[in-house]
Image: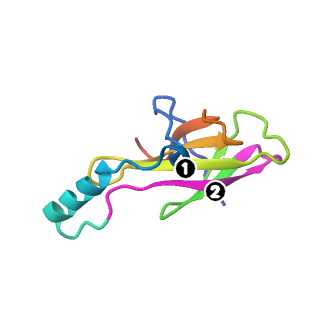
């Protein structure tokens, strides 16, 4: 069973990493963090995953690696055959405090939903 996400309108959309890719400077930051913090193995998560839509509940659900299932109420009707993906990233400085997500419909560059789905950002 998925828990409903909390919508936070103050969050900027999470980029579609399939389109924009990942920032190369993060590799250097992660290497520096490992040197400074020793046992730290991960500081951030960025991913795009497929999402599904349940027309009965009007919920879009997706599975976030490590964090598990998240569901959000769809702000628009999803057409039959529409493709959904959710792009997520953790927020917080050293320890993730939450996960932000943006949901994209049919490869449109503008998300239909953006907000915090786990924790606080």
Residue range corresponding to the magenta coloring: 42-59
Q: Which residue is mark 2?
A: 2
Quarter holding the N terminus is bottom right
The percent position of residue 67, horizontal first and vertical second, equals: 49, 60
Residue 58 is inside the magenta segment:
yes
Density class for disc 2 (Cα within 10 Å; few <14, some 14-19, many ≥20) is: few
- The residue drawn where x is 50% and y is 49% is 88
- The residue drawn where x is 41% and y is 56% is 45
* Image: 107 above or below 94: above
Quarter holding the C terminus is top left
Residue 60 is inside the magenta segment:
no
Residue 75 — which label?
none
Q: Residue furthest top?
A: 10
Q: Secondary structure at mark 2?
A: loop
Task: Please indicate whether residue 56 sits to the left or right of residue 101 in the image.
Answer: right
The percent position of residue 46, horizontal first and vertical second, equals: 45, 53
**How far apart are the two marked residues, 2 and 1, measured between alpha carbons?**
25 Å
Q: Secondary structure at mark 1?
A: helix
Ranked by sequence position, the earlier of labels 2 and 1 is 2
Density class for disc 1 (Cα within 10 Å; few <14, some 14-19, many ≥20) is: few
Q: Which residue is mark 1?
A: 18
Q: Residue furthest left?
A: 36
Picture quadrant where residue 16 is located: top right
Q: How many marks?
A: 2
């Amino acid at each position: 069973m998925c828990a409903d996400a909390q919508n936070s309108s103050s969050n900027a959309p999470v980029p579609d990493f399939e389109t924009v890719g990942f920032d190369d400077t993060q590799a250097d930051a992660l290497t520096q963090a490992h040197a400074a913090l020793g046992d730290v193995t991960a500081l951030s998560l960025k991913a795009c995953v497929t999402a599904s839509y349940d027309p009965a509940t009007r919920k879009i659900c997706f599975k976030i690696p490590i964090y598990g299932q998240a569901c959000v109420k769809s702000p628009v009707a999803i057409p039959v055959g529409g493709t959904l993906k959710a792009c997520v990233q953790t927020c917080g400085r050293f320890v993730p405090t939450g996960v932000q997500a943006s949901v994209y419909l049919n490869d449109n560059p503008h998300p239909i939903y953006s907000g915090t789905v786990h924790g606080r950002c």
